[in-house]
């Protein structure tokens, strides 16, 4: 299994000699990896931030560092990796030839480098502590978020001692082979073990990626072709989804229109008057029902209830209404030509009915009195 992260010196361990799989790397399937690269080829410089706008820093930084470099600035690659608490810029500087060389090693090993980091940054960082590791005869030293270096042992120990002399509160962690000679002045202050740097599971310092600018990782044509079918299927899926949504939306709009038409038609069947818009049907229906409820209450209230009750009795009797009044919680009706009315059954549910002849008039002039039974019962 190919790991996603490793040191560039270990890439040849992933190459197998089965058949002719690696005869032409250009035709093979390249693997994307994050790579650690030798820190002895990378220098860390600290400079004051230019006063010019930030967009011009990329052009100015090489000229600011020109006097510190042994090689022409046009042959170097510069990466702004961070700022110190005092606001100074921390710049990683590496030869462009080294960058090209590392990319070539990766490609020859069947790898596309996604990122490259100085390998001293694979060491753990802890404030006020110097971490020292070992890689193939080289000491890796890290003493800050960005600060560190790689050098042979005879050069590294004096530099570490210099850091300790500058700050006596610093602690030291040494992860080195047991047979490596370390100055006593350093071992007296150090925690020592023989563990090796774990390249695969060390945290990647994204701000220190050397693959920037012209060296930024690009997608290979082989990888692009590999993903074309998937991308095509993705685009097709999106188009089909959009078409489906359009058809579904049209169907839903049609159903909504049908429901609105039925709603307004049913309103017209139930209520008279102007047909309201579909959005107003609920409000108008509630108003109509409220009005009908009020009418129903009114019809069941005296004297209207008595008039409604006597309606069937008076229908077709040939009577002439002479007087109508409501007195003492009873409806009093005076009529002439009431002979036909006297012959009818005067039983009205819920009411006590009394018929008398009006004084001083003919025998067919009568007075009809309706009294609600519930009132009589209450009395």
Image: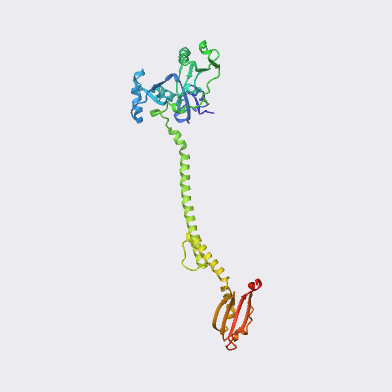
- The location of residue 351, given as percent across then percent down, is 63, 75
Number of callouts in the render?
0
Residue pictured at 48% horizontal, 47% vertical:
241
Residue pictured at 52% horizontal, 62% vertical:
286
From where the camera sits, is residue 315 visible? no
Q: Given the current orientation, which residue lies at the most extreme bottom position?
A: 362
Residue pictured at 47% horizontal, 56% vertical:
253
From where the camera sits, is residue 120 visible? yes
- The location of residue 301, given as percent across then percent down, is 57, 70
Q: Is residue 306 above or below residue 22?
A: below
Asked whether, in this view, residue 159 is left or right of residue 303, the answer is: left
Q: Is residue 139 above or below residue 221?
A: above
- The location of residue 93, given as percent across then percent down, is 40, 22
Q: Nearer the viewer, residue 97 or 150?
A: 150
- The location of residue 362, given as percent across then percent down, is 58, 89
Q: Given the current orientation, which residue lies at the most extreme right position?
A: 377
Q: Specify the quadrant of the image occupied by residue 97.
A: top left
Q: Which part of the image, by quadrant, shows the C terminus?
A: bottom right
Q: Nearer the viewer, residue 282 or 149?
A: 282
Q: Specify the quadrant of the image occupied by residue 195.
A: top right
Q: Which part of the image, by quadrant, shows the N terminus?
A: top right
Q: Is residue 252 above or below residue 47?
A: below
């Amino acid at each position: 299994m190919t790991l996603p992260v490793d040191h560039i010196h270990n890439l040849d361990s992933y190459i197998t000699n089965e058949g002719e799989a690696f005869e032409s790397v250009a035709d093979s399937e390249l693997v994307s990896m994050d790579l650690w690269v030798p820190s002895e080829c990378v220098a860390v410089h600290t400079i004051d931030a230019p006063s010019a706008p930030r967009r011009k820093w990329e052009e100015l930084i090489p000229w600011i560092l020109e006097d510190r470099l042994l090689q022409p600035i046009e042959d170097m690659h510069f990466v702004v990796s961070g700022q110190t608490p005092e606001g100074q810029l921390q710049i990683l500087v590496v030869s462009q030839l080294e960058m090209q060389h590392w990319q070539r090693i990766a490609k020859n090993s069947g790898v596309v480098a996604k990122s490259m980091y100085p390998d001293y940054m694979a060491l753990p960082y802890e404030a006020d502590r110097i971490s020292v590791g070992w890689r193939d005869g080289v000491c890796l030293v890290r003493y800050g978020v960005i600060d560190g270096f790689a050098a042979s042992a005879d050069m590294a120990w004096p530099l570490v001692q210099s850091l300790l002399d500058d700050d006596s509160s610093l602690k030291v962690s040494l992860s080195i082979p047991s047979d490596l000679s370390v100055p006593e002045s350093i071992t007296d202050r150090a925690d020592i073990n023989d563990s090796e740097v774990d390249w695969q599971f060390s945290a990647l310092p994204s701000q220190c990626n050397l693959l920037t600018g012209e060296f930024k990782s690009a997608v290979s044509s082989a990888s692009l072709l590999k993903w074309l079918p998937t991308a095509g299927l993705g685009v097709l899926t999106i188009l089909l989804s959009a078409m489906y949504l359009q058809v579904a939306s049209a169907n839903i709009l049609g159903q909504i229109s049908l429901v609105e038409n039925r709603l307004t038609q049913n309103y017209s069947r139930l209520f008279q008057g102007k047909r309201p818009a579909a959005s107003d049907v609920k409000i108008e229906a509630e108003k109509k029902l409220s009005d009908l409820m009020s009418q129903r209450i009114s019809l069941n209230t005296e004297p209207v209830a008595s008039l409604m009750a006597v309606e069937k009795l008076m229908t077709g009797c040939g009577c002439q209404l002479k007087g109508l009044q409501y007195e003492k919680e009873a409806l009093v009706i005076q009529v002439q030509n009431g002979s036909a009315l006297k012959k009818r059954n005067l039983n009205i549910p819920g009411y006590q009915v009394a018929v008398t002849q009006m004084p001083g008039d003919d025998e067919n002039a009568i007075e009809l009195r309706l009294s609600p039974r519930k009132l009589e019962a209450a009395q």
